[in-house]
Amino acid sequence: MRRRSRADGQSVETRRRKTVTLKRRNAPKAVRRRNPSAVSQETEVARLTRELQTSEQRWRSLLENRIFGVTFLDEHQRFISTNQAFQTMTGYSGEELRQMTPLDMNVPGEREFNQTFFRELQQGKRQHFEMIKQLRHKDGKLIWIHLYVFAIPDQKYRGLLAFGMAFDVTEQKQAQDALQGTVSELARVARMNQMAAVLGSIAHEINQPLAAIAANAGAGLRWLARATPDVGETRTVLQWIVRDANRAGEVIKGIRAMFKAEGQARGLVDFNRLMRDALALAQGELQKQRIVVQTELAAKLPSVTGNEEQLQEVMFNLITNAIDAMSSVTDRNRLLRIKTEFNGIEEMSVTVEDSGTGIAPVNIDHIFDTFFTTKLHGMGMGLAICRSIVESHSGTLSASPGYPHGAVFRIVLPFGRSGGE
């Protein structure tokens, strides 16, 4: 087939090819080929956008949950933002909460502890803290919350913010309190019954020789009052008096032996665990009296050798005495401080300090005396028995006035040995 030609001698096909080539040469580079780096940047931006959207959705789900409250606090401990769950929990609106701090909802006795934790969080001394505490609802009722607080950095505020999660555990706490109150009451009744039985036995055992002594002494006086005193009969009744007095002495010796090493099972006692157990027994009354407990238990405290039941009885008695001493306090926080610590290499000590009415100076030297008491219905046996138990473990129990209020009881016990060994 014959190719068509133009006047300039070029074929139509050749002319068409030159035109296409010329157009391609004059086209913009962006149209001819895409930059690989630009494509990579667009892909990365799309990926980051998707991740940001996913993160925002997760965060929104966290804030909108109805199970626990979420709070943010600024450097002044003022609420920056709260979620709906926390607002419902406390009864305040978000706007009302932004004018408040958690301290505005605190109950007496907890404010100083919260301030301390918050200050340590801001200073970087701790990264988080956890506590179960009470808050006062807007309508005045008290609620219990389980609180977790974390320190998180924030560029806007140029420092650390406090991020909190709060769970309402009021119903759970009320159930626990009811159960603990029942357990504490049963323990108290059992101890009272045991003490009543012991005291009844002591009274019975001592009453017999004392009654005999009184009767014989009366008979002796009558024989001496005769016109001719009957010396022989008087001598006889005096011998009976001596016998009965020795019998009474044996009874008292037997009572004291109850708190000595003889016949008592002894072993290694972890005093930190013993303290926690004693506090658990008194938990119901501590909560009822709204007493804040602060413990400072020495780490890796060596065990002491002794009778665990007796030593726990001592600690329970000291704790209940502290509760009684604070029951009438209304002008300050009711605070119970318990501390265990090393004293050198051979001794440990435990301190029980309260913010109660304290010990009058005139009574400080007599509070461990048998039958001495300042309670209206007390028998004056508790502290005397406590000191006997501690001394039977080769230790000491002392008391001193607290500062600025209350009283301090201090027990010192040796490591690795006890009375009777």
Image: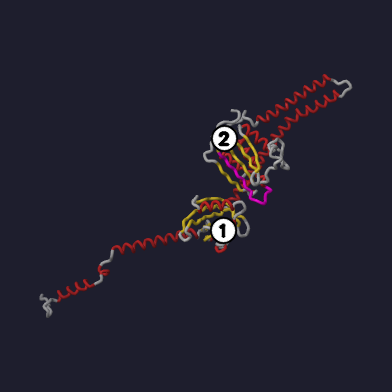
| x, y percent for residue 213 | 78, 27
Is label 1 in contact with label 2 (beta carbons under 8 Å)? no
| x, y percent for residue 132 | 56, 51
155 shown above or below 125: below
- Sort mark 2 into few (<14), some (14-19) or many (20+) by Cα contacts within 10 Å: some
Depth check, front residue: 167 or 71: 71
Three-letter amino acid code of the residue under disc 1: Thr
Residue sitting at 69 percent across and 48 percent down?
328
273 shown above or below 81: above
**Residue 120: which numbered mark, if any?**
none
Quadrant of the rendered structure where residue 15 is? bottom left
Residue, far right: 227
Residue, far top: 232
Could you tell me how far apart the alpha carbons at marks 1 and 2 are, in whole angstroms?
45 Å
Pick whichever of labels 1 and 2 is earlier in the sequence.
1
User: What colouring method underlies this structural image?
Assistant: secondary structure
Disc 2 designates what residue? 347
Q: Which residues are magenta?
A: 327-341
Residue, far bottom: 7
The answer to whether residue 7 is visible is yes
| x, y percent for residue 112 | 58, 52
173 shown above or below 207: below
Judge from the rendering whether residue 323 lies leftward or rightward of residue 123; answer left or right.
Answer: right
Depth check, front residue: 315 or 16: 315
**Residue 101: which numbered mark, if any?**
1
Quadrant of the rendered structure where residue 415 is? top right
